[in-house]
Amino acid sequence: MAVFNHPSYDAHEQVVFCRDEESGLKAIIAVHNTHLGPAFGGCRMWNYHSDDEALTDVLRLSKGMTYKNALAGLAMGGGKAVIIADPAHMPDRAALFRAFGRFVNKLGGSYYSAEDVGTSPADIKIASEETPFVAGLEGKSGDPSPFTALGTYLGIKAAVKHKLSRDSLQGLKVAVQGIGHVGYHLCRHLHEDGAELILTDIHPQSLAQVASEFNAITVAPQAIYSQDVDVYAPCALGATLNDTTLPLLKAAIVAGCANNQLAEARHGEQLKQMGVLYAPDYVINAGGIINVSFETDYDMAKATAKVEQIYQTLLTIFREADAQNRPTAEIADEMARKIINGQKR
């Protein structure tokens, strides 16, 4: 398994492979960049098909966290962790996350972990028994999912404002792919704003329950791309915008909370050529980490106010992309790099 010449390696500062025989832990922690502060990013648990798939994911996710935290105006660098395991079949989660906490602790504060896909604040609370370098704990900033959903909802509104010249989502059709912790709260916001929802998820029972609550239509997972909608909101795993799915899209806007939505950077250009407005993922989904950044002396009102700034940040990116005739993802990357390198936006 190559690292330094891996396609997703981007001058990462640290890539740590973690193995604990007693608990069965297999994890990778990637610290991408700490120029703005210690690396913050969640711990994802997923049943990866291979170690290389896990490495690719953690490298891409950690880089995204660097850019996310920079554009959100946070004094944080970017990092991420992945645990290679099936989250639905863990015999002893407590032992696993205590072992994970010990590995995080060995990094001495260069990386702070939190919950992510397949993990929960309860898991991170267990890890906190072994290390102080965690965030998003209950009793402090808590579950970041509702704030990620709020930011994503406001980002969709910004995209609708820019692309469709509308302030309301009333009557607009939104296809939401994935109704997990964040996707559920996003659906609630969209429903309350009058959007008509088309949903899909790999868990049929959960899908049926959420669809009933929000009077939504459900479709099979592979059918979500070709729905005749105004907005496609990817809220599951990454790389759903690729050579196979892009020709199927009928949406005018792509705006969702999933990380690494573009399979490759060139797909951002392809969306532009298709006339589809893309909300860069690490900008629109920054609400959770913004909330976590207020962990010390937590103030929900201040956290919410900062999450609401995502709306204006995206409008700035959209307008600049139009002015330069460039993909929105390129503009966002450029803005983030300037911040990381110590320049003002």
Image (cartoon, grey):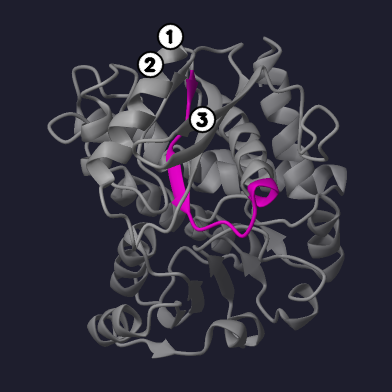
Residue density around tag 2, few if under 14, some if 14–19, many if 20 or more, within 10 Å: many
The amino acid type, in three-letter code, at marker 3 is Cys
* Quarter of the image where the N terminus is located: top right
Of residues 16 and 153, the one nearer the viewer is 16
* Residue under the point 71% across and 56% down: 262
* Of marks 3 and 1, the one in the foreground: 3
Q: Quadrant of residue 58?
A: top right
* Residue under the point 53% across and 56% down: 258
User: Mark 1 or mark 3, which is nearer the start of the sequence?
Assistant: 3
Q: Is residue 319 shown left or right of residue 108?
A: right
Q: Tags 1 and 2 in contact by the CB under 8 Å rule?
A: yes
Outermost residue on the front side: it is 22
Q: CA distance from mark 3 to mark 1?
A: 15 Å
Q: Which mark is residue 18?
A: 3
Q: Secondary structure at mark 1?
A: loop
Q: Is 229 situated above or below 8?
A: below
Q: CA distance from mark 1 to mark 2?
A: 6 Å
Disc 2 marks which residue? 105
Disc 1 marks which residue? 108
Q: CA distance from mark 2 to mark 3?
A: 12 Å
The x, y position of residue 239, in whole percent, is: 68, 60
Is 44 magenta? The answer is yes
Q: Secondary structure at mark 2?
A: helix
Residue density around tag 3, few if under 14, some if 14–19, many if 20 or more, within 10 Å: some
